[in-house]
Image: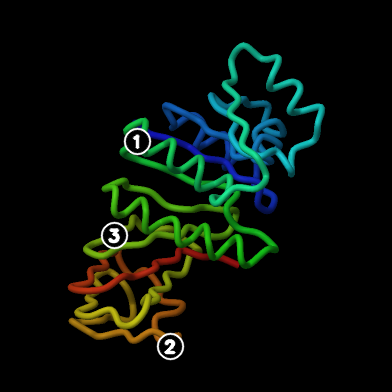
Amino acid sequence: MKTLIVGSGNEISSELVKKHYSWADYVIAADGGLMHLKKAHLIPDLLIGDFDSLPANLLKEARQSKEIEVAQFPPQKDLTDLELALNLAIEKGTTHLVILGATGNRLDHTTANIHLLYKLMKNNISGYIEDNNNRIYMTDKELILEREYGYNVSILPLPPVANGVTTKGLVYKLDNADLSFGTGLGVSNEFNDEKAVISVRKGLLLVFLSKD
């Protein structure tokens, strides 16, 4: 099952929302993520969260809708709205997942959301976070990327070290390299082929496709 989760992060283009909405079998709005869908004239299958960032009129509309399931949680909870949405997607048997609205001005929230990619990986879900300028992946094995013109590729290790990192299809190549946490060595690489392959023998990598 292909699932789209829309969070309440920074502005997302309606074109990007519509692209993934048409791809998905199931759509979850995490709290204020409903506003991004509303702007694109779309509705989710499920609205979930404590609704502290959702205008009252939109919450009322959602509750009155026969097409939207609403799951409300108390503000005093252990998990973020986005993680609640992710857990539910896992329970429903999601195999492919895209998360929009996971990045923004609150770097603590952005970092926590990026950490959620680990949960995707450990549940064998293929997925990533995307916004208007970035796509973020996590891998502990191999990642294959189709060429995106205008995008740079950055490879950053998570602690303590990523061993045996090898790349193909990028300008600056790595061959069984060890990348230690705390360096920007892997930032701003470029495609030189229609497909890039990034692999790691041991450890974790964050892979960013980014444009200005």
Of pointers 3 and 2, the one earlier in the residue sequence: 2
> Disc 2 on helix, strand or loop?
loop
Q: Which residue is mark 3?
A: 195
Give the distance between the C-alpha atoms of the residues marked 2 and 1, in whole angstroms: 34 Å
Pointer 1 local density, CA inside 10 Å: few below 14, some 14–19, many at least 20: many
Give the x, y percent position of residue 165: 24, 77
Q: Please indicate whether residue 80 sits to the left or right of residue 160 in the image.
A: right
> What x and y, as percent, mark residue 87?
43, 42
Q: Which residue is nearer to you in this view: 120 or 18?
A: 120
Q: Which residue is mark 2?
A: 183
Q: Nearer the viewer, residue 130 or 78?
A: 78
Q: Nearer the viewer, residue 33 or 108?
A: 108
The residue sitting at 31% across, 70% down in the picture is: 204
Name of the residue lying farthest toward the front: 76
Q: Which mark is residue 173?
A: none
Identify the residue position indicated by label 1 in the image: 94
Q: SS of the residue at dot 3?
A: strand
The CA span between labels 3 and 2 is: 26 Å
Q: Are marks 3 and 2 in contact (CB under 8 Å)?
A: no
Report the residue at 31% width, 59% height from top.
194
Viewer-nearest of discs 1 and 3: 1
Q: Is residue 206 left or right of residue 210?
A: left
Q: Residues within 10 Å of mark 2 (few under 14, many from 20)?
A: few
N-terminal of the two: label 2 or label 1? 1
For marks 3 and 2, give the one nearer the viewer: 2
C-alpha span from label 1 to label 3: 26 Å
Q: Decide: few, some or many residues near mark 3? Use Cα within 10 Å; few <14, some 14-19, many ≥20.
A: some
Amino acid type at image mark 3: Lys
Q: Position of residue 188 (x, y in %)?
A: 46, 77
Residue 68 placement: quadrant: top right
Q: Is residue 41 left or right of residue 172?
A: right
